[in-house]
Image: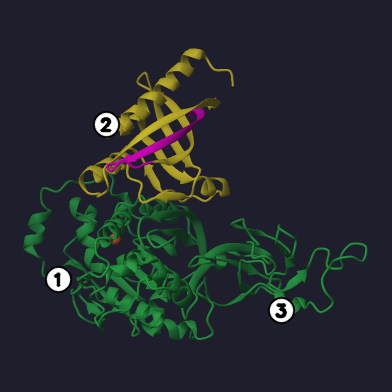
């Protein structure tokens, strides 16, 4: 280490409710995260089985900054491969998706089968007895680097690490059950878009776990008098702290004491001209209207009324990230349910009535954080630990759970 | 398609008025460019070409168009910003009982309050235009944006 290099970052104490701003801005921390979080003992969402229905189908995706190819091979198995030619390191697949027999690097035509094994090297015997591979070159050692893969309810996850526990153990029973609750049938992709966020990836990872901000930053429901007093909800947190689920449910009006203050405040509200996007077909066997679940480090599984989606978070440098939205329905949706999903989808995404502000909020923190890297955030709500919450979502426990996971992976 | 020049001029006037209404922040007038049952969608080129239906914004009827503007004015929080639309390549591609089909290109430069300018969106308008009480209106306006990627958030209609 040279004399004028900054000392390696350390967290000053055990407190996960006080986060040093440096973690949002520091290039060294960002580089360590690639190795220790994204290529560490974590399950990273890659794509959906529904996107690879046939042998030979492939799709490219990301684990952290690393480009990954996901294929379905002739045995029907899913493979996750680092998208980097064993020869010179070029991306083997530079197209987003397709169907192919071989993965062939365009640079020098090294070709891999769908499992990532090196199948052919151009001019391997040279030309006219000159050049070519040395006799002792072993193709077996020069395939594409493989990730371990697990699929769960149509979601495909990959990990670089042998230390990552089985996916079910990684999630724990409570948060596995909440995936079961939403992904009840074969999925159908309704569309894609992405959103560039002007902030470090962790600020969005925190935002999705921050149920405290929901009604404060996103005032669409309150403004138009849509939040009924008979809503209750809670926050589930994995025992590890790493993953969470925040939910709200409709309960019969007679079951709760109606808050008269709140009802009064709902008078003289603005109203919507067309409330059809607030309709809800209860298709999941309960009365839950909102369920936002995270899988550490980079996945969000969303049910907002009948709007289903997965969101994949990809870091793009210390101060930028990209959020990939895949909008979902079920294969057996009829036309009416499809139409409803498309309307409700107005609530979410980069133009969503109750989510567009998340693009703003992270950027505001990013701009504030640069002033003093050693200063710390203050997140005391429902604190200081990672206790789940029943009946209230005014808690930052799931955010603290994220930092517990982050520190464990980073060894900080 | 061979189109009566006066109709073509009226279509170009409609497009011009539409973009000035947005760029001048007279958004309360924006829904009036549509018929009562008018549909408005902003969809990525990828989704459009693959036949995937999900849109970034989907308004089915004037009520939803008005709600987009009232949400923006009264509920949504965003950095102050303005658009400058430029357009062209207007092509009348067909006409039938459901209206005149027209396609055109557009670019939107977005300027934020700190002065940052960016090419926020470019792509095509795919329109179905009908005449109502002597005025041309959009029965359908599909905004196909070339990039799948939206910078930060999309609040003002394109
Ligand atoms: Fe939010």
What colour has chain B? yellow
Find residue B133 and report its horizontal and vertical position in percent.
35, 20
Work out whether residue A310 or residue A319 is closer to the camera in this orientation and state it: A319
Find residue B38 and report its horizontal and vertical position in percent.
38, 35
Colour scheme of the picture:
by chain
Q: Is residue B93 left or right of residue A117?
A: left
Find residue A333 and report its horizontal and vertical position in percent.
48, 59
Q: Is residue A14 left or right of residue A242?
A: left
Mark 2 on the same chain as mark 3? no
Indicate the quadrant containing the N terminus of chain A: top left, top right, bottom left or bottom right: bottom left
Provide the residue span drawn in magenta.
B97-117
Chain identity of mark 1:
A
- Residue A308 part of the magenta-drawn span: no
Choose top left, top right, bottom left or bottom right for residue A299.
bottom left
Q: Whole-Å distance between the Cαs marked 2 and 1?
A: 44 Å
Q: Nearer the viewer, mark 2 or mark 1?
A: 2
Residue that numbered label 3 is attached to: A141
Q: Residue furthest right?
A: A128
Check residue A256 in the rendering and tell me which mark sits there, or answer none.
1
Q: Nearer the viewer, mark 2 or mark 3?
A: 3
Q: Whole-Å distance between the Cαs marked 3 and 1?
A: 65 Å
Work out whether residue A403 or residue A152 is closer to the camera in this orientation and state it: A403
Check residue B26 in the rendering and tell me which mark sits there, or answer none.
2
Answer whether labels 2 and 3 touch (C-beta < 8 Å): no
């Amino acid at each position: 280490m040279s004399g004028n290099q900054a000392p390696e970052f350390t967290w000053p104490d055990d407190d996960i409710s006080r986060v040093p701003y440096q973690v949002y801005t520091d290039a060294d921390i960002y580089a360590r995260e690639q190795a220790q979080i994204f290529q560490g003992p974590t399950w990273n969402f890659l794509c959906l089985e529904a996107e690879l229905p046939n042998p030979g189908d492939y799709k490219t995706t990301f684990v952290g900054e690393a480009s990954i190819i996901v294929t379905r091979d002739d045995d029907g198995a899913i493979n996750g491969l680092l998208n980097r030619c064993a020869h010179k390191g070029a991306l083997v697949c530079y197209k987003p998706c397709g169907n192919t027999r071989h993965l062939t690097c365009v640079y020098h035509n090294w070709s891999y089968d769908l499992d990532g094994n090196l199948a052919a090297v151009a001019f391997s015997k040279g030309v006219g007895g000159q050049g070519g591979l040395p006799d002792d070159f072993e193709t077996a050692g020069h395939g594409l680097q493989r990730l371990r893969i697990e699929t769960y309810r149509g979601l495909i996850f990959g990990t670089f690490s042998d230390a990552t526990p089985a996916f079910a153990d990684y999630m724990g029973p409570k948060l596995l059950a909440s995936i079961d609750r939403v992904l009840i049938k074969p999925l159908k992709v309704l569309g894609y878009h992405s959103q560039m966020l002007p902030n470090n990836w962790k600020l969005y990872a925190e935002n999705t776990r921050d149920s405290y901000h929901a009604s404060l930053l996103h005032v669409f429901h309150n403004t138009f008098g849509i939040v009924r007093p008979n809503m209750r909800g809670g926050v589930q947190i994995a025992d590890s702290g790493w993953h969470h689920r925040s939910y709200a449910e409709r309960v019969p009006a007679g079951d709760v004491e109606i808050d008269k203050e709140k009802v009064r405040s709902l008078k003289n509200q603005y109203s919507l001209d067309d409330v059809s996007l607030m309709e809800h077909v209860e298709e999941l066997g309960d009365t839950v209207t909102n369920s936002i679940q995270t899988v550490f480090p980079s996945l969000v599984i969303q049910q907002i009324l009948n709007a289903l989606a997965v969101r994949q978070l990809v870091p793009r440098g210390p101060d930028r990230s990209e959020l990939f939205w895949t909008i979902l329905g079920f294969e057996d949706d009829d036309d009416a349910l499809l139409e409803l999903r498309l309307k409700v989808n107005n609530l979410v995404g980069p133009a969503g009535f109750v989510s567009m502000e998340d693009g703003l909020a992270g950027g505001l923190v990013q701009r504030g954080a640069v002033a003093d890297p050693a200063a710390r955030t203050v997140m005391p709500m429902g604190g200081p630990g990672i206790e789940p919450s029943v009946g209230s979502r005014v808690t930052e426990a799931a955010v603290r759970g994220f930092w517990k996971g982050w520190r464990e992976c980073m060894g900080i | 398609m061979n189109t009566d020049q006066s109709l073509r001029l009226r279509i170009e006037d409609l497009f011009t008025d539409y973009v000035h209404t947005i760029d001048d922040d007279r958004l309360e007038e924006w829904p009036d460019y549509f018929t009562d049952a008018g549909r408005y969608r902003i969809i990525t080129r990828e989704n459009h070409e693959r036949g995937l239906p999900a849109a970034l914004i989907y308004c089915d009827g004037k009520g939803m168009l008005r709600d987009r503007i009232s949400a923006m004015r009264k509920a949504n929080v965003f950095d102050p910003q303005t658009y400058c639309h430029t357009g062209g390549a207007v092509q009348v591609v067909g006409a039938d009982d459901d209206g005149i089909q027209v396609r055109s290109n557009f670019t939107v430069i977005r300027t934020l309050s700190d002065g940052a300018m960016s090419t926020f969106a470019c792509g095509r308008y795919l329109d179905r235009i009908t005449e109502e009480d002597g005025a041309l209106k959009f029965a359908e306006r599909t905004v196909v944006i070339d990039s799948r990627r939206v910078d930060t958030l999309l609040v003002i209609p394109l």
